[in-house]
Image (cartoon, rainbow, N blue to C red):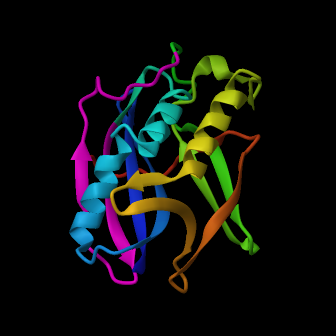
Amino acid sequence: MAVQMMECNINYIADGQLCTNVTHWSADVVETNLWNLAKRFVAALDAPTAGDAIYEAIRGIMSDDCFISSAFARVLLPSPGTKAIKVYPSGDFPGLVASEIYAQSVASVMKSVTASGPDYTGRTFFPAVPESMLVKGRFTDTFRPLFNDVMAAFDAGIVTADGTWDQVIFKRSNNTYEPVTNRQLNPNPGTIRKRLLPV
């Protein structure tokens, strides 16, 4: 078997604005066709497996003015592969909180750390924070347990026919990565500035 590292982008439309988050995952797999690995990874995101738990958990913290619009994945290491893409209609994965978006640029932030500590940390921004979940720039007590569901879903990993993909932190400067050991909700809302073109 060989350890592969996958990059995954999940894209959202938040009240008409495109937002994205990028995560990295690794698994020890037999498959050598990198396109097939990416294709099965993307398919697992919305299948009735642990991957589905990630979508459902993310929807639980999003305003209903937002929806998951697409996802793509590709193997990055040890050698790069072809990108697999899946696009969703607006009604497939909408946010579940009946509240307007606080602001299109405001996001909740999951901080992830590895056993190495400060050298391997990452942040994942989730758009479409509902207005009802923020008071005076702080998340409400209602929001925190919903975000715990997100962290638990990421901890469970993405289950495919190839095995379970566990989240890692990727260090681009030297093309290395380490498994995530802990996650937490950043107490301060984040600001999404980077935008991508729609798929």
Q: Residue at x 61, y 68 (%)?
A: 179
Q: Quadrant of the N terminus?
A: bottom left
User: 29 left or right of 146?
Assistant: left
> At which x and y percent is residue 134?
69, 24
- In the displayed structure image, the side of residue 94 where residue 87 appears, left or right: left
Q: Is residue 113 above or below residue 183?
A: below
Q: Quadrant of residue 89?
A: top left
Judge by depth and name the residue closer to the eye, 8 or 17. 8
Is residue 91 within the magenta segment?
yes
Does 64 lie within the magenta span? no
Q: Residue at x 64, y 29 (%)?
A: 146
Say which of 173 and 153 sits in front: 153
Horizontal side of 56 relative to 135 (left or right) equals left
Q: Is residue 146 visible?
A: yes
Q: Is residue 55 above or below residue 140?
A: below
Tell me which residue sits at (77%, 23%) in the image: 141
Report x, y in % for residue 104: 49, 33
Q: Which residues are magenta?
A: 69-97
Please say if 36 is above or below 1. Answer: above
Is 157 located above or below residue 19 in the figure? Answer: below
In this picture, residue 52 sits left or right of residue 69:
right
Answer yes or no: is residue 104 visible. Answer: no
Q: Position of residue 138 (x, y in %)?
A: 76, 30
Residue 6, located in which quarter of the rendered image? bottom left
Q: Which quarter of the figure has residue 102?
A: top right
**Residue ranking furthest to the top:** 98
| Residue 106 vs residue 182, the one in the foreground | 182
Residue reaching furthest to the bottom: 174
Query: Total of numbered circles in the picture?
Result: 0
- Residue found 51% across the figure and 13% down from its top: 98
Tell me residue 37's x, y (percent): 29, 65
